[in-house]
Image (tube, rainbow, N blue to C red):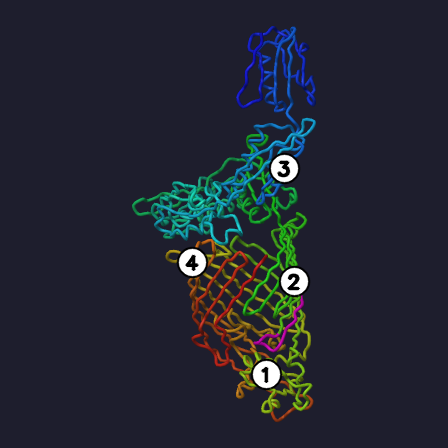
Amino acid sequence: MLSGFSIPGAPVIWPLLAPAAAQSPDAINVEGNRRVEAETIRSYFRPGPGGHLDQAAIDDALKELVGTGLFQDVKINQAGGRIVVSVIENPVIDRVAFEGNKKIKDEQLSAEMQSKPRGTLSRPMVQSDALRIAEIYRRSGRYDVHVTPEIIERSNNRVDLVFTVDEGAKTGIKTIEFMGNNSFSAARLKDVIKTHETNFLSFLGNADIYDPDRVEADRDLIRRFYLKHGYADVQVVAALAEYDPERKGFQVTFKIDEGQQYRVATVGFRSNIAGFDPTTLRSLSRVSEGSLYNVEAVEKSAEDMQIEASRRGYAFAVVRPDGDRNFEAHTVGIVFRVEEGPRTYIERIDIRGNGRTRDYVIRREFDLSEGDAYNRALVDRAERRLKNLDYFKTVKITTEPGSTSDRVVLIVNLEEKSTGDFSVSGGYSTTDGALAEVSISERNLLGRGLFAKATVSYGQYSRGLSLSFVEPYLLDYRVALGLDAYYKEQLPTDYTTYGVKTIGFSPRLGLALREDLTLQLRYSLYQQEISLDSAYANCNNNPSNPSLAFNPTPAYIQSVLGGVDPTNSVSSGLYGYGCYGDGESTLPVRKELAAGATWTSQIGYTLSYNTVDNNKNPTDGLLIDFKQDFAGVGGDVTYLKSAVDAKYYTPLVSDLVGLIHLQGGLLTKVGDNDLRMLDHFQMGPNLVRGFATNGIGPRDITYASLGAVGDALGGTKYWGASMELQMPFWFLPSEVGLKGAIYADAGSLWGYQGPTSWAATGEVNTAACKCGLQYDDGNVVRTSVGVGLIWASPFGPLRFDYAVPLTKGKYDIVQEFRFGGGASF
C-alpha cells in the first residue's frame, strides 16, 4: 500500500514510503505532461544492478524532478506492478512586468531577474526575484521599498508575472561621525571618504546613499590618509551604520585609533644580488631623514626602484621596504632591500570585457609583454594607467598559473563605460560677460584610444569655434600628438576700443619624462586682425560732417575717456585723429588696423612639474610651468616670449590650505621687426586682483590732460606674487564644495616697446592732432588685498572675488568685484 507526504517549501509531492518491488524503467507510466517529454521524465529514473529500480533510485529520481523547477506538483504511485508518475507542469511565463517603479527603469530590473519570459514559473524563484528588486532599491538609497509579486493566470497554462513596487522615500545618510580623531577634524576626514551626508545638492548624485561596500572602502581611504601623514599605527577599528527610523536615514560612525605620528629616522639600502649596488637607487627615494613617515611615498619609492633595477638587467629583482619602529622616539628606520625574486615569466596576457576598446589600446599601457619576466611593480603601474584612461568602470589585473610552474597568465578584467560627452553650458563673468557653449567630445574614438572634441561658443564679448584631436600614442611610442584648429573673435568692451579676430591651428607633441614631469612641444600658425566698433569706426578729421561724427558709448566715455565727451564742441577737433586714419583709438591700434591681417608662425615648448595631490582641489604639492615661444619661423612678426608660473600648496593647521603663487614673464625683440601691441603681455586680475581686465601696465595718455585715457598697451616684462589662505566653512557639509579665501597680491607690468609714432598722410587737423604716442610706463608695484568665495559646484567651478587695491598706477583701471564661472546642463 502506498502513501504520500508533503515536502515543506516545495510542490506537493507523493513519494513511495513503503518498500516497493523492484521495477524496470520500462514499467513507468507518465501522466499530466504537456511540454516535457515522457522519456525525459523517465530518464531521471536510473536502475541499479540488474536493471531494476529500488527504493533509493526512485527517491533520487524524485529529488531530481523536483530540482528541475519544471513541475508544480509531482506524485509517484504504484498500480498493477507499474510505477505511475503524475506531474503538473509549472506554467510558462508570457511576460514579466513592473509597476510603480519610477526611479529605476524596467530594463535595469529585467536584467537582474531570474524569471524570464517563455521560461517556467518557479515560486521560490519569484520570491528570490522580489528580494533582488528590493536589494537594488536599497542600493540606490530606498530602504522603505516593498515589492509584491502577482501571478495572473492566462489560457494554455500560461501566466503573466507582475512585480508591484512601492518605492518609498529616499533614505540617505543623515550624519557621518568620527570617534577617536584627535589630529584631524571631522570636516577634513569627510573630504577623504566617498560617502557624503544628505544635503540640498544630493539630488545631483548618489554619494549620500548608504552602500556597505562604499563604506568599507572608506575605511581603507581613512587608513591610507593617516598612513600618508605619519600615523604608522593607525587602525580604523569599525565602520558602523545604524538606521534611524524617525529620521528615515542612516548614521555612519567610523571608530579610529590614531596612534602616534612617526618621522623617518634613517633611510638605508641593502642587496643580496651579486654585483648590484643598492645605493645607486638613492635618488629614486621619495622619503628622506627627518620627514614625516609616508607609506604612499615609501611604496612609490620601492616601485620606482624595482622598475629601475629591471631596466638595468635585473629582471627578477624585487625591492621590499622594511620599517624598524622606535616606539619611544616615534621614528621609523626604513631599509629598502633588493632581493632576487622567483624566476617567473609571463606566458600570455588575456584581456576580458573590452567589447569596444581594441586590444592594442590596452596592451600598450603595459611595459611588459608575453615572454618577459613577471614584474609586479610593472603590472601595478599598468593597472594604474588603465584606470587613468577613464575608459573603464573597473580595472583589475590578476594572475593564474601557466602551463608550467615558472609561467603565469595575466588576466585583465575590464568593465567598459561610456566615453562620449555632450554638454551645453552657460556662464557669466565680469571679464567675458555672458557666454554660452556647446561641445561634443569622445575620449575613446572608434575604440582606438583617440580623443576628439568640437566646441562652439557664443558670448557677449567673445565667439569662437575650436576642434581638437589627440593621438596619445604616436607610432606606438608614449608620445601624444595633438592638433587644434580654432577661430576666435574678441569684441570691443568697455575697456578696449577694438576687437581681434584670430584664426589658426597648432600641432603639438606631449612627452611624459617622469610621472611628475612632462614636456610639450608645439608649433602655432595663426592670423590676427584688428577691427573697430561701428560706434567710433566712422569718425574722421572733419567734425563738421555729422554723418562721420564719432559717437562713443556712454560706458566708453566714462571708463576709457575719463568722462570727456569727444563729440562736444570743445573736444571734437581733438578727437579727429586725422593723422591716424578714420576713427578714434590708440595709435598702435590704428597701426594694426592699417597693417591688416598679420600672420604669426611660432614654435614653443612647456615644461611642467606637478606633484599636487589633487588637480581639481589641490591641498598639497607643487605645480610649475615654464614655457617659451619663438615667433619668426616665417610669418610677419618675430619675438621670443618666456613665462614661468609656480603654485605651491601646503596644508596648515586644521583644514586650512596655504597657497603661494609666483609668476613672471619676459618678451624679447628678435631681429629687425618691431614688436606689435598684440604681442605684448596684457595683465589685470590674472596678475593682481582688484583691477579690470587689461587694467594695469602701460597705457595711452596722449590726451590725458583733457581727462581722456586710451587703451592698454601691454608690457614686455611682468612679475606677480600672491599669498592665499583657503578654508572650508565648517558649518556647511563638506560635499557642498564651498570654501572661503583671503589673499594679498602684488605685481607689476611694464616695458612697452611697440609703435610710438606714425608719419601722417593726407589732411590733418593740426589744431588738435598729436601724431606721437604718449604713454605711461612706470614700473609701479600694484598691490591689493581681498576675500574670495570658491564653489566647486555641480554646474562647474565658480569663484567670487572682492579685492581692494592698496597701491596702483595713476592710470590703472580698478574693478573691485570679479566673478567667473559656468554651468553644464
- Residue 430, by quadrant, is bottom right
User: How far, Cα to Cα, is label 1 from label 4?
Assistant: 50 Å
Residue 73 belongs to magenta span: no
Q: Nearer the viewer, residue 229 or 117?
A: 117
Marks 2 and 4, the one that precedes in the sequence: 2
Verify CB contact (< 8 Å) between mark 1 and mark 4.
no
Rendered location of residue 296, percent (x, y): 45, 47
Eyeballing the image, is 18 above or below 572? above
| Mark number displayed over residue 756 | 1
Quadrant in the picture for residue 579: bottom right
Q: Quadrant of the C terminus?
A: bottom right
| Residue that badge 2 annotates | 456
Amino acid type at circle 4 is: Pro
Mark 3 = which residue?
Answer: 97
The residue drawn where x is 47% and y is 47% is 195
In the rendered structure, the answer to whether residue 82 lies left or right of residue 606 reads right
- Name the kind of residue labelled 1 in the image: Thr
Q: Which secondary structure lies at badge 2? A: strand
Mark 3 vs mark 4: which is more N-terminal?
A: 3
* Quadrant containing the N terminus in the rendered view: top right
Dot 3 falls on a residue whose secondary structure is strand
User: In the drawing, does residue 547 fall left or right of residue 415?
Assistant: right
Seen from the viewer's position, the closer of residues 281 and 581 is 581
Q: Are the residues at dot 2 and dot 1 in contact (C-beta closer than 8 Å)?
A: no
Q: CA distance from mark 2 to mark 4?
A: 35 Å
Residue 605 percent across, percent down from the top left: 58, 63
The part of the chain drawn in magenta is 492-507
Give x and y (percent) for residue 511.
58, 55
Above or below, comparing residue 641 to residue 761 in the picture: above
Of mark 3 and mark 2, the one earlier in the sequence is 3
- What residue would you read off at disc 4? 728
